[in-house]
Image (tube, rainbow, N blue to C red):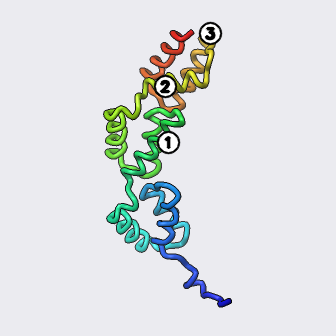
């Protein structure tokens, strides 16, 4: 057995980034934070991320699409998805384009998603104003807007 020096054991930012990207998609900002936590220099990180993006190994657009799909599967609305993507460093224009593309392609119907999410959580719902307010708060916290909440409540009421 040979004992390797610390510099030989240290991995490059590219090695660490590839290892992270092998598990799931990361936004450029998230990847930069992870690499910085592993004590890589900002210059090395920037160069590495530029190279990965040029090679198509890291893409904020691909991350946004993947993230959107995962959040739709969880029953989260557009406002929450938008906020989460912004928090992960995705530019507002890309977020807007990703959400618009998903709607245009028919991948997501926010009104239907709100109704399904509500029905899954509150089945059967109560008739009292207190129960209705509880349902409204639930959907609002999940990121659905007023019209989507109203649609979901109407659909749930019609199902009774």
Q: Is residue 107 above or below residue 159?
A: below
If you read the primary sequence from the N terminus, does the residue marked by circle 1 or circle 3 appear first?
A: 1
Q: Secondary structure at mark 2?
A: helix
Q: Secondary structure at mark 3?
A: loop
Q: Is residue 64 above or below residue 137?
A: below
Q: Which residue is mark 2?
A: 114
Q: Secondary structure at mark 1?
A: helix
Q: Which residue is mark 1?
A: 70
Q: CA distance from mark 1 to mark 3?
A: 33 Å
Residue for point 51% across, 27% down: 140
Relative depth, front residue between 61 and 137 = 61
Q: CA distance from mark 2 to mark 3?
A: 20 Å
In which quadrant of the rendered view does residue 136 lie? top right
Quadrant in the picture for the C terminus? top right
Relative depth, front residue between 69 and 82 = 69
Q: Which residue is mark 3?
A: 128
In which quadrant of the rendered view does residue 118 lie? top right
Residue for point 47% across, 66% down: 18
Disc 1, disc 3: CB below 8 Å?
no
Residue for point 50% across, 22% down: 115
């Amino acid at each position: 057995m040979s004992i390797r020096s610390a510099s030989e054991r240290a991995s490059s930012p590219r090695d660490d980034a590839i290892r992270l990207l092998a598990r799931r998609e990361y936004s450029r900002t998230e990847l930069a934070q992870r690499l910085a936590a592993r004590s890589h220099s900002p210059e090395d990180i920037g160069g590495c991320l530029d190279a990965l993006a040029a090679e198509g190994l890291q893409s904020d657009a691909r991350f946004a699409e993947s993230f959107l799909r995962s959040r739709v599967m969880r029953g989260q609305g557009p406002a929450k998805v938008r906020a989460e993507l912004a928090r992960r460093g995705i530019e507002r224009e890309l977020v807007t384009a990703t959400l618009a593309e998903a709607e245009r392609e028919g991948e997501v119907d926010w009104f239907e998603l709100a109704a399904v999410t509500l029905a899954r959580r509150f089945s059967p719902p109560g008739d009292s104003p207190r129960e209705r307010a509880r349902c409204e708060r639930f959907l609002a916290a999940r990121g659905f807007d007023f019209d989507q909440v109203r649609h979901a409540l109407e659909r749930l009421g019609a199902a009774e």
